[in-house]
């Protein structure tokens, strides 16, 4: 950086008459007039040099310092270099005494500036503030806590909370919601809830923070309870509230409630906001109504990258791979540059529709856009290769990744080994999973079933033994169905739902009717050593999705579409049962499992039995 560039030639960023600085009308520093024109770091540095030359150090120009710091930190997350520069300027001031300077820097870190170390840097600025004897105000705490939240720095956040309590600022109307949000972002929902319960609860911002926290921690029902409380108190939800509540509906598969919220959004005239519409598309798609999702997308006046990406993922999830890909091409035609999420949608679409060569081409083209693949992209490619039976190639792909593979990648391959009945590859993969995470019940179950189905009894017994030694339990299957705005949850085999007895009786009747059209329980994926065929068929009979489907048949008018959400992957037997129910009872069934959507109609499933 040249030290005195302003004397020779006027900088292109300064007004042309820079040889004659503006007259001193009042006490304003003449340098201030030039500041707004300094958008590049270089121009700021030039002006900074002039200020230093003017003598008296930077303290002599407090208004200039404030402006300089503000300009640099406003760039925050977009230009970390500016923030680093502001910090250097600040660090060179012997005794900075202006609370505004500290707050400005902290705000830069709060915006996500300073990369992952934003919280540590913010903490250092705060410590210096204490050392200099400058009293923090509410803005200081809000920014400090936001910096901790954006860096997911729970430990620093807790310390900041402690200081805020000592300073008497923790209960302040701006600080308290920020605390709730900080704990939520750092994954401590209990602490967030304790903070929330301490407040008098008449504040929309803290409700928003708590609702968002619940959704993030996969507690959608709690989020909806809070939303209803808000309405009962007459608090007016903001777009932030509604976006979170829509996510809660998406997690639960609560379509009717989602529709109600959509109407509410129209009434509130919030339906022109891109982010709200994007959340609506996501909610409709995840609640099984692709038609509604497409409707929202088509009605949008302007669409951003995220809206396109969410729509693509929706198509892919519902088994419309070709449509997802043509959207991707359309988006590129419109000059929108795809990002990592967009590519996730495309790869997902290819893997769910068996388009292997296309998927690999798209994966390679990520580099052209300067996008570094993340673990989820690698997951899609693994899935793509593994589903199509290229197990060896998928193994090699994971093994040679530039990053350390996670258990999830190997898990994807393990379920493909089970699907293709390749027990030797399954064993290699199972061993790799145990090195990374030996606490996941599903892995043991999949592998022991694979051994059982291929007659490897000794290995199967070994896996079962290992499972009980480690005390690993299988996650119970749970399916939910929404009827008249109530979400009913059923667990496999258990009798906890108040109507589970009648649902079981209904399952029995349904199965008797299905047997007439040739239904035979597929027990190949159920394995317990002591079980005979009879018992296996019984354990299958009360799988959670069968209970939910039967409950739906009992409690809805003929012809009503049944929408089911399941927490695990649907098993082959429930899949074939649902196909038959759709035919015999003339119902559309839309079932969302852990991986995708299945639309059953007239005895056929949209996934083409490729799941």
Image (cartoon, helix red, strand yellow):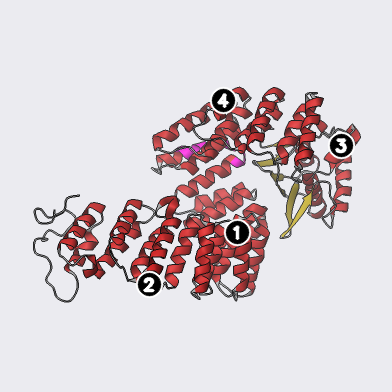
Q: Main secondary structure of the magenta part?
A: helix
Helix, strand or loop under label 1: loop
Mark 4–mark 1 distance (CA, rounded to whole Å) = 38 Å
Picture residue at 56% right of the left edge, 25% below the top: 396
Q: Is residue 79 above or below residue 52?
A: above
Mark 4–mark 2 distance (CA, rounded to whole Å) = 58 Å
The residue carrying pointer 1 sits among few (fewer than 14), some (14 to 19) or many (20 or more) residues within 10 Å by Cα, namely: some
Quadrant holding the C terminus: top right
The residue carrying pointer 4 sits among few (fewer than 14), some (14 to 19) or many (20 or more) residues within 10 Å by Cα, namely: few
Q: Which residue is mark 4?
A: 396
The front one of 392 and 305 is 392
Camera-near label (4 vs 1) is 1
User: In the rendered structure, which segment of residues is drawn in magenta?
Assistant: 317-329
Q: Which residue is mark 3?
A: 537
As for residue 325 lying within the magenta part, the answer is yes
Q: Which residue is mark 1?
A: 188
Camera-near label (2 vs 3) is 2
Camera-near label (4 vs 2) is 2
Dots 4, 2 in contact, CB < 8 A = no
Picture residue at 38% right of the left edge, 60% below the top: 108
Mark 1–mark 3 distance (CA, rounded to whole Å) = 42 Å
Q: Measuring from the top left, give residue 524's x and y in whole percent.
A: 80, 30
**Lower sequence index among marks 1 and 3:** 1
**Lower sequence index among marks 2 and 3:** 2
Q: Measuring from the top left, give residue 355's x and y in whole percent.
A: 56, 29
Q: Measuring from the top left, give residue 100's x and y in whole percent.
A: 35, 70
The front one of 90 and 375 is 90
Helix, strand or loop under label 2: loop
């Amino acid at each position: 950086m040249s030290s005195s560039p302003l004397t020779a030639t006027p900088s292109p960023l300064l007004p042309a008459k820079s040889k004659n600085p503006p007259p001193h009308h009042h006490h304003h520093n003449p340098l201030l007039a030039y500041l707004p024109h300094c958008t590049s770091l270089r121009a700021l540095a030039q002006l900074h040099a002039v200020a230093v030359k003017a003598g008296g150090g930077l303290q002599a120009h407090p208004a200039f310092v404030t402006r300089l710091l503000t300009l640099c930190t406003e760039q925050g997350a977009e230009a970390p270099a500016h923030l680093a520069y502001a910090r250097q300027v600040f660090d060179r001031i012997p005794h900075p005494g202006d609370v505004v300077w500290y707050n400005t820097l902290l705000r830069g870190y709060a915006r996500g500036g300073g990369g992952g170390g934003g919280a540590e840097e913010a903490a250092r600025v705060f410590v210096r503030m204490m050392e200099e004897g400058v009293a923090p105000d509410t803005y200081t705490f809000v920014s400090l806590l936001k910096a901790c939240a954006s860096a997911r720095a729970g430990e620093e956040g807790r310390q900041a909370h402690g200081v805020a309590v000592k300073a008497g600022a923790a209960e302040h109307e701006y600080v308290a919601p920020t605390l709730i949000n900080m704990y939520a972002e750092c994954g401590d929902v209990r602490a967030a809830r304790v903070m929330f319960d301490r407040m008098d609860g008449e504040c929309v911002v803290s409700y928003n923070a708590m609702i968002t926290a619940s959704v993030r921690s996969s507690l959608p029902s709690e989020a909806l309870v809070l939303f209803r409380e808000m309405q009962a108190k007459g608090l007016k939800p903001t777009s932030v509230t509604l976006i979170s509540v829509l996510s809660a509906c998406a997690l639960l598969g609560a379509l009717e409630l989602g529709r109600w919220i959509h109407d509410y959004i129209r009434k509130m005239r919030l339906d022109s906001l891109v982010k709200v519409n994007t959340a609506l598309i996501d909610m409709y798609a995840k609640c099984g109504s692709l038609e509604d999702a497409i409707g929202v997308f088509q009605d949008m006046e302007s669409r951003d990258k995220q809206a396109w990406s969410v729509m693509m993922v929706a198509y892919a999830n519902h088994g419309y791979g070709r449509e997802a890909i043509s959207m991707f091409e359309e988006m590129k035609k419109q000059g929108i540059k795809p990002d990592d999420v967009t590519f996730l949608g495309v790869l997902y679409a290819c893997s769910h529709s068996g388009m292997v060569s296309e998927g690999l081409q798209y994966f390679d083209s990520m580099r052209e856009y300067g996008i570094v693949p993340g673990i989820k992209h690698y997951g899609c490619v693994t899935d793509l290769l593994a589903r199509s039976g290229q197990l060896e190639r998928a193994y090699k792909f994971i093994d040679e990744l530039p990053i350390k593979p996670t258990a999830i990648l190997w898990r994807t391959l393990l379920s493909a080994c089970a699907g293709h009945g390749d027990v030797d590859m399954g064993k290699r993969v199972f061993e790799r999973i145990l090195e990374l995470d030996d606490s996941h019940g599903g892995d043991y179950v999949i592998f022991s079933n694979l051994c059982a189905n291929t007659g490897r009894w000794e290995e199967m017994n070994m896996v079962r033994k290992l499972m009980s030694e480690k005390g690993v339990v299988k996650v119970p299957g749970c399916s939910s169905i929404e009827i008249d705005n109530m979400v009913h949850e059923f667990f496999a085999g258990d009798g906890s739902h108040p109507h589970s007895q009648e649902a079981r009786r209904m399952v029995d009747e349904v199965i008797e009717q299905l047997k007439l059209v040739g239904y035979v329980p597929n027990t190949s994926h159920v394995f317990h050593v002591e079980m005979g065929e009879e018992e296996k068929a019984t354990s299958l009979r009360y799988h959670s999705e069968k209970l939910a489907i039967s409950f739906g048949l009992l409690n809805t008018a003929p012809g009503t579409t049944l929408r089911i959400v399941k927490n695990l992957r649907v098993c082959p037997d429930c899949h074939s049962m649902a196909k038959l129910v759709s035919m015999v009872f003339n119902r559309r069934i839309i079932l969302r499992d852990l991986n995708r959507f299945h639309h059953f109609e007239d005895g056929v499933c949209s996934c083409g039995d490729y799941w």
